[in-house]
Image: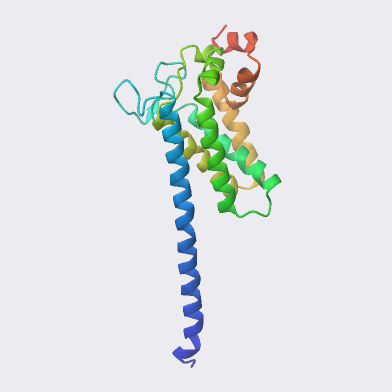
Amino acid sequence: MASDKQFGPKVEGNAAKGTRKQRSFVPCILIVVALLGAQAVAVASLGHPWICTCGSVEFWYPDPAGPWTSQHLTDWYSFTHILHGFGFYALLWLIAPRASFGSRLLLAIGLEAAWEIVENTPMVIDRYRQQALARGYFGDSVLNSLSDTVFAASGFALARILPVWTSALVVVGTEVFLGYMIHDNLTLNILQLIRPSEVISRWQLGG
């Protein structure tokens, strides 16, 4: 029978590795908190409310063209931010394949936070208002903006876990589902933001 002394160095070595891993999470968590904090302050400084000006906080807001879209925790466009995460994962896998998952996740959160700030500038909001479904759009609440970043991070994590073919099915299926349910999705959103189309606008309004 082996003595306890024989197992001692190995057990201590594993414990030390576990402690180092736990310590490595602390800087990552601090960076995430800093990114989200900077995002919140920046969006608020652009004049956006912290929560919906309706005075309530709902988990789900169902009307894609309603006055409180992008004001509550989640809405139909939360799905598009999950797809942001899939896109960031593919992009960062291509340009930084040797980087650790944690490093790429932090970059993805930073990219999404930066986009959330840009998206809520007057210039981009005015651009969105040219779309049929966003005529009354006035930007995100800080709460919704932070929620969008969390959804993007979730999509990034899903892309890491799922096989490539499953990820592709999720992306395509989500786009088709949103197109059917609300006549909008990430692809149409990007197209309408870059070059608004009257044909797409009429279709979105049911014409």
Position above or below: 189 against 19: above
Residue located at (61% from left, 55% from top): 100
Residue 134 location (% of width, % of height): 50, 15
Residue 188 location (% of width, % of height): 61, 21
Dividing the picture into quadrants, the one containing residue 66 is top left
Residue 155: in sight, yes or no? Answer: no
Report the residue that reaches farthest toward the right: 94
- Please state the total of marks drawn on the protein image: 0
Q: Relative to the observer, which residue lies in front, 122 or 205?
A: 122
Residue located at (64% from left, 9% from top): 199
Q: Relative to the observer, which residue lies in front, 68 or 180?
A: 68
Q: Relative to the observer, which residue lies in front, 6 or 144?
A: 144
Residue 124 in the figure: left or right of residue 49: right
Residue located at (48% from left, 42% from top): 35
Position above or below: 21 against 169: below
Dividing the picture into quadrants, the one containing residue 107 is top right
Report the residue that reaches farthest toward the top: 207
Residue 62: in sight, yes or no? Answer: yes
Q: Quadrant of the C terminus?
A: top right
Residue 64 location (% of width, % of height): 47, 19
Display colour scheme: rainbow
Position above or below: 124 against 18: above
Report the residue that reaches farthest toward the left: 55
Residue 139 location (% of width, % of height): 46, 22
Residue 154 in the figure: left or right of residue 175: left
